[in-house]
Amino acid sequence: MTINKGYVFSIVAVVLYALADAIVKYYVTDYDVTNVMFVRTLARFSSFILLAIFQGVNPYKTKNVKNNIFRSLCSLGVGFAFLFAYKFAPMTDVVVVSQASSIIVIPLSIMFLKERFNVYTTCAILLGFLGIAFAFRPSGNVLQLGVLFALIAAILSASSAVLSKKLTSSDSELTIIFYQQTFVLLASISGCNIQAMPTSVIVCLLLSGIISALALYLKIHAYKFANCSYISSTAYFILIPTTIIDFWVYDKSPDAYIIAGAALIIAGCVIANIKK
């Protein structure tokens, strides 16, 4: 079994995202969402600005301005769609529906990236989705506004992934990230008031931003080594570090559903890496 570099980078990115999100979730219930988003984005963007200065490059220079802008808008839309989804629907329902992005990626990759259909990758994605659904056990009330927003987030997330793969053939990771973070920062800066937040909270959120910056870089970098649909099969792996964090931080032991879901996800990861 040969493990692709892109797959490894993506798995590491997923674990880092889980850690960064755990920090955010700890504070987001007590502090304004806009403030939390702004501080995290500021730290993330600052990390990439320093990297651009160190490399002496202009990250905005590209021949694919339209695609970068469109991808940035998709990423921004994902963020807002998730916020509205969480407002109108249970978190478990939102998580399960949003993971459909990994399935939506398959036809988009075939149509726009001319990627060849791969039965192993498809099985991995389907097992991963089944694992997530099994672990979180969504409620039966699927006809609700929150789920609609979660589905919109899934479609936009899949579109963003396909555009990321397309852009990595000509643009650097920094260019792709700079366009995205510029849009997110401009959207979050309006209405924020970080003076109301304690210094200790701001420091923790800045740390979350730095961790998510590394995760974002690795995620974009992964597309240089593997097909879009192949990378998408790693998204479900987030259940593993999330379960560990819940156990370690919140003393929440995984039940049989979580364990079974994790087993399905791990099985999907193994199948995805079967040598063709």
Image (tube, rainbow, N blue to C red):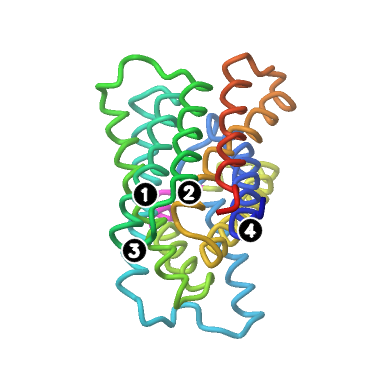
Front one among 258 and 25: 258
In the image, which disc is placed on residue 214?
4
C-alpha span from label 3 to label 1:
10 Å
Relative horizontal placement of residue 246, taking residue 187 as reference (left or right): right
Q: Is residue 87 above or below residue 229?
A: above
Q: Is residue 189 magenta?
A: yes
Is label 1 in contact with label 4 (beta carbons under 8 Å)? no
Give the percent coordinates (x, y) of residue 185.
45, 59
Magenta stretch: give its range. Answer: 187-193
Q: Residue sitting at 59 percent across and 21 percent down? A: 260
Quote the CA–CA distance across marks 3 and 2: 16 Å
Mark 2, residue position: 232
- On the image, the x and y values in percent for residue 31 come to 53, 35
Amino acid type, callout 2: Ser
What residue type is disc 4 on?
Leu
Could you classify mark 3 by the number of other residues whose Cα lies within 10 Å: few (under 14), some (14-19), or many (20 or more)?
Answer: few
Residue 190 in view in this figure: yes
Q: Which residue is denoted by mark 3 in the rendering?
A: 114
Q: Position of residue 252 (x, y in %)?
A: 67, 18
- Identity, as a three-letter code, of the amino acid under mark 1: Ile
Marked residue nearer the N-terminal end (3 or 1): 1
Q: Which one is in front in this view, the residue at disc 1 or the one at disc 4?
A: 1
Number of numbered labels in the structure image: 4
